[in-house]
Amino acid sequence: MIVLIAILVLAALAALALWLKKELEQLRAASGQQLAVQLTERNADVDRRLAGLVETMDRRLGELDRRVDHRLESAARTATAIHQQLGKIGETNTQMLDRAKDLARLEQALRPPKARGGFGELLLGNLLADTFPRDKYELQYGFKSGERVDAVIRLDRALVPVDAKFPLDNFNRLIEAEDEAEREQHSKQFVRDVKSHVDAIANKYIRPDEDTYEFALMYLPAEAVYYELVCNKLGGETGPLGYALERKVIPVSPSTLHAYLLVILLGFKGLQIEEHAREVMAYCAQLGKDFSRFKEDFELVGTHIGRAQSKYAEAEKRLGRFETKLERAADSELEPGAPETVQELPRALDAA
């Protein structure tokens, strides 16, 4: 009995095992199908996303390629322009070197004082020609002593002498000096040269007896020379600037000379205005004299008219009395035998 029960239990367990195995196989098959569907859907979703990413990346890479190409083209154009500018700069440098060589040759040509003085006179003449009418200045003006000044400016009835020759040898040595002792030596020599030149200008060209003003202009050919002379205080208190002003010699540079010339030009205009004012005053004085003569004539005519009026009134009174006498004579009868008396008529001269 027990064995039978055991057999039955074992058979039931075997059947249960078979059923469970079958159920598990069915469940595994269903799960595999569901998982395959989900995996397919996930793969499709991933493929779509990857396709979108690839498309986005392709678009962005295309835009990046276009930008890179554009920038490369711009860089190429910029590089071409830079090369062209560098070529022009090279040409400019070549021209500047040529100009420097020309200036060096000009400097060598102007080293002799005579050539340098002629060049300064040329610059001075051009500056005067650009500022004044031709009749207001004269180049190479000669004095009675035989001296000739580079230029004179005709201001009113007097002359302003302008000298364009200036000693530059020691100034060049002063600029090229390498140590302080050499610079001091050339500085003293330059100061002596300037003072000697100032004395020559004052003695030769300031001639009030020959219609010059009591001052002269000393034209310095370069601004650097003017700076050293005026601003650097060469020589201390006894420097060339103070000495020149004491001798009534005014240093001017190419720029300050133009300012001085403009002041002189304004002086010309002021003198013209003053001359016109004098003419107007003279004309007004003449008008005053003419008015005085007219007033005298008018008063004389008034006097004559007053006298004529007085005589006219007196003659009118006489005429009235004469008329009264005529009326009385006409109305009265003469007595018989009485001699007729004829009244004397008023003289015509009295009536005048």
Image: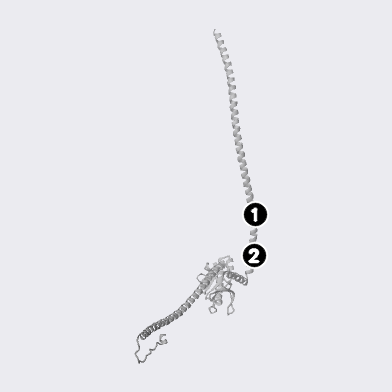
**Residue 136: mark in rendering:** none
Residue 123: x, y in percent?
Answer: 60, 69
Residue 319: x, y in percent?
Answer: 39, 84
Please identify the quadrant where the C terminus is shown: bottom left
Residue 26 seen in the current view? yes
Please identify the quadrant where the N terminus is shown: top right
Q: Is residue 82 left or right of residue 160?
A: right
Q: Which residue does the image show at 56% across and 8% down from the upper left?
A: 4
Residue 318, image quadrant: bottom left
Residue 90: x, y in percent?
Answer: 64, 57
- Which residue type does callout 1 highlight? Gln
Write down the residue under mark 2: 102
Q: Which of 168/261 is in front?
A: 261
Name the N-terminal-most of marks 1 and 2. 1
For residue 88, above or below residue 62: below
Q: Decide: marks 1, 2 in contact (CB < 8 A)?
A: no
Bin the neighbour count of mark 1 within 10 Å (Cα to Cα): few under 14, some 14-19, many 20 and up.
few
Residue 49: x, y in percent?
Answer: 59, 34
Write down the residue under mark 1: 84
Total labels drawn: 2
Mark pair 1, 2: CA separation:
27 Å
Q: Which residue does the image show at 59% across and 30% down from the upper left?
A: 42
Q: Secondary structure at mark 1?
A: helix
Q: Nearer the viewer, mark 1 or mark 2?
A: 1
Q: Which of 195/249 is in front?
A: 249
Residue 239 seen in the current view? no
Residue 149, image quadrant: bottom right
Bin the neighbour count of mark 2 within 10 Å (Cα to Cα): few under 14, some 14-19, many 20 and up.
few
- Which residue type does callout 2 highlight? Asp
